[in-house]
C-alpha cells in the first residue's frame, strides 16, 4: 500500500465494477480502507440514487457505523475492479477503548449529530430542487439501424445514440423509443453512461453517447427481444 498510513488489516476483499460493498440501511460496524480502485458513496433521496462522492485509494469509509453504532447511512459500490482492506476489529476496539469515556461520548455525539445534519440537508435539497423527468425521443424506421445501435452498446442493456451533441455522463431521462413495426413507443428510464464528443470521433467511432436502461418493464423487454430476433423483411 502506497499511502501515508498503514492499517492493521483483518483481511482483504476484491469487488467487480458495480458490486455493493455496503448497503444503505444495513447493520455493520466494520471500517474499510481502499487498497486499489475506487468506491462510489451514494444515498437514496426520495426514491432516487444520489452520488455523494467517489473515494480513491487509501481513503477510509464505514467509520460512522463503528463509532456511532448506527445503521449504514449510505451505499458503497466498487467503481471498476476494487480491492478493500478490512481494518482489524480488535485493533480498532483496543485503540478506541484507550480514549477516556468522556471523549468517546463526545465522538459518538458528534457522529449522531452529523448523521442528522446530513439527513436534513438531503431532505431540504430534495424539496428545493425537484427533478422533472426529461424526455428524449428516438425513432428507428429500419430494424437494422436499431440492431446496430443496440449491439454498439457495450452492456447490451442500452443503446448507442449517434449525435454531435451528447448529453453529460450521469444524466438521467425517459427514453421514448419508437421501434419499427411497433405501434406505441416504449418509455424507458435511462442514463448516459459514456459520451464521445465530436473532437474525439473517428470514422468507425462516431460522436455520440452510450445509454444504459435503468428501468424497463417486462413487456418492453419482450418487445425489444422480438424486434431484435425478427427475420429481415423481404426486399
Image (cartoon, rainbow, N blue to C red):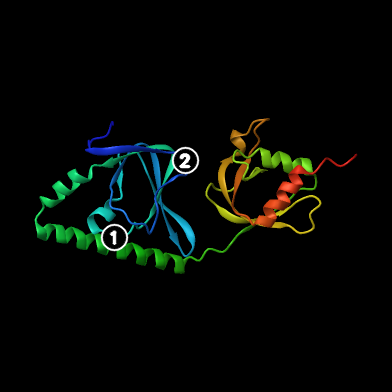
Q: Is the residue 68 above or below the residue 228 in the image? A: below
Residue 125, given in percent of the width and then of the height, sits at: 42, 65
Circle 2 residue: 17
Quadrant in which the N terminus is drawn:
top left
* Mark 2 closeness class: few <14, some 14–19, many ≥20 residues within 10 Å: some
Quadrant in which the C terminus is drawn:
top right
Locate residue 79 relative to residue 95 in the image: left or right.
right
* Mark 1 closeness class: few <14, some 14–19, many ≥20 residues within 10 Å: some
For marks 1 and 2 on the same chain, the one whose residue lies earlier in the sequence: 2
Local SS, label 2: loop
Locate residue 181 relative to residue 173 in the image: left or right.
right
What's the distance in space between the residues labelled 1 and 2, CA to CA? 27 Å
Circle 1 residue: 70
Quarter of the rendering containing residue 195: top right
Q: Is the residue 158 above or below the residue 36 in the image? A: below
Residue 82, given in percent of the width and then of the height, sits at: 40, 37
Quarter of the rendering containing residue 55: top left
Q: Residue at x 16, y 61 (%)?
A: 106
Q: Residue at x 23, y 42 (%)?
A: 88
Front in this rendered view, residue 90 or 221 = 90
Residue 65, given in percent of the width and then of the height, sits at: 28, 55
Quarter of the rendering containing residue 107: bottom left
Front in this rendered view, residue 13 or 52 = 13
Local SS, label 1: loop
Amino acid at each position: 500500500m502506497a499511502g501515508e498510513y498503514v492499517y492493521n488489516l483483518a483481511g482483504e476483499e476484491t469487488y467487480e465494477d458495480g458490486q455493493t460493498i455496503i448497503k444503505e440501511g444495513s447493520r455493520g460496524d466494520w471500517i474499510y480502507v481502499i487498497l486499489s480502485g475506487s468506491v462510489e458513496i451514494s444515498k437514496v433521496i426520495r426514491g432516487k440514487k444520489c452520488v455523494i462522492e467517489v473515494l480513491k485509494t487509501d481513503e477510509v469509509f464505514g467509520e460512522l457505523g463503528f463509532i456511532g453504532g448506527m445503521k449504514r447511512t449510505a451505499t458503497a459500490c466498487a467503481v471498476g475492479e476494487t480491492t478493500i482492506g478490512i481494518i482489524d476489529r480488535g485493533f480498532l476496539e483496543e485503540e478506541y477503548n484507550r480514549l477516556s469515556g468522556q471523549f468517546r461520548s463526545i465522538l459518538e455525539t458528534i457522529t449522531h449529530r452529523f448523521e442528522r445534519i446530513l439527513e436534513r440537508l438531503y431532505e431540504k435539497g430534495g424539496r428545493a430542487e425537484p427533478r422533472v423527468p426529461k424526455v428524449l425521443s428516438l425513432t428507428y424506421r429500419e430494424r437494422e439501424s436499431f440492431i446496430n445501435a443496440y449491439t454498439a452498446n457495450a452492456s447490451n442493456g442500452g443503446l448507442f445514440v449517434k449525435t454531435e451533441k451528447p448529453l453529460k455522463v450521469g444524466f438521467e431521462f425517459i427514453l421514448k423509443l419508437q421501434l419499427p413495426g411497433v405501434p406505441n413507443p416504449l418509455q424507458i428510464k435511462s442514463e448516459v453512461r459514456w459520451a464521445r464528443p465530436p473532437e474525439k470521433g473517428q470514422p468507425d467511432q462516431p460522436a455520440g453517447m452510450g445509454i444504459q436502461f435503468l428501468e424497463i418493464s417486462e413487456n418492453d423487454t419482450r418487445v425489444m427481444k422480438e424486434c431484435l430476433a425478427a427475420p429481415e423483411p423481404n426486399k
